[in-house]
Amino acid sequence: MSKLYTITSNYSQGSQVQIQGTHASDELFLKFEEEYRNTSLGNVFYAWMKHDKTRVDLKINSPEDIEKIAYFFETYSKDLNIPFATFQEPALRNSTTAISFVAPDILCHPIQYAIRDLFFELIKFKNRHIQMNSFVDNFCMADILNSLKFHSNGCTILLSSQSNDVTVEYEDVSIKLNPAQLEFYRTVRHLKLS
């Protein structure tokens, strides 16, 4: 099931949270009409509108953090198959105050804590020649180890030196994630509910 997420910063308080989030959602609807229609991103958005309709509101610490997430989406939205839009508040010198996006099914599994634990576990494995700041920036599994089977939070995570993809198994589900998808789980899915 896909979900529409809206991210606002702790800078917005009270009714401003909903107002800024709604502005970002409105921007996403406009972007669908003007840019996404008849594209794979438009198909994700349309499927959410027609079938799923689940909304999730998230909070992030600061306006600077919202800018970082916006940059992440600008860079990887096509790799993630995520339609997104931001809202820049004119009264705040056009700073980004909210982001709205639809995450497809593959990015809505309850595995974010296992992915977080995997990242910390990989940091333990790194040697002094590997600088690992994110899955996307420097995903070098083959350099770190030949293969690894990792268990955390009810998930089994299989890493292979044959590709940069990771297989996550939980319950009766098995999903294959690329580095951008792993980074999405590590950064975006850990945000607090609003």
Image (cartoon, rainbow, N blue to C red):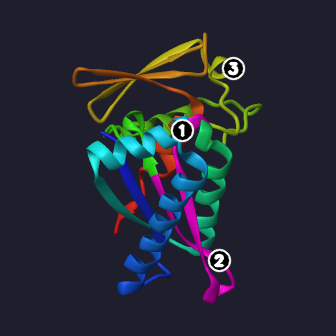
What amino acid does circle 1 point to? Answer: Asn
Residue 30 covered by magenta stretch: no
- Tell me which amino acid carries mark 2: Ser
Query: Which quarter of the figure is the N terminus placed in?
Result: top left
Q: Earlier in the sequence, mark 3 or mark 2?
A: 2
Q: Nearer the viewer, residue 160 or 174?
A: 174
Find out whether the residues at labels 1 and 2 contact each other: C-beta distance under 8 Å. Answer: no
> What residue appears at the point 66 percent right and 56 percent down from the top-left corner?
71
Find residue 58 and report its horizontal and vertical position in percent: 39, 63
Mark 3 or mark 2: which is in front?
Answer: 2
Q: What residue is drawn where x is 72% and y is 38%?
A: 131
Range of magenta residues = 79-101
Residue 95 numbered tag: 2
Identify the residue at the far left of this view.
171
Q: Is residue 85 magenta?
A: yes
In the picture, residue 167 is in which quadrant?
top left
Residue 59 coordinates in the image, percent (x, y): 42, 68
Q: Amino acid at mark 3?
A: Asp
In the depicted structure, whether residue 61 falls above or below residue 140: below
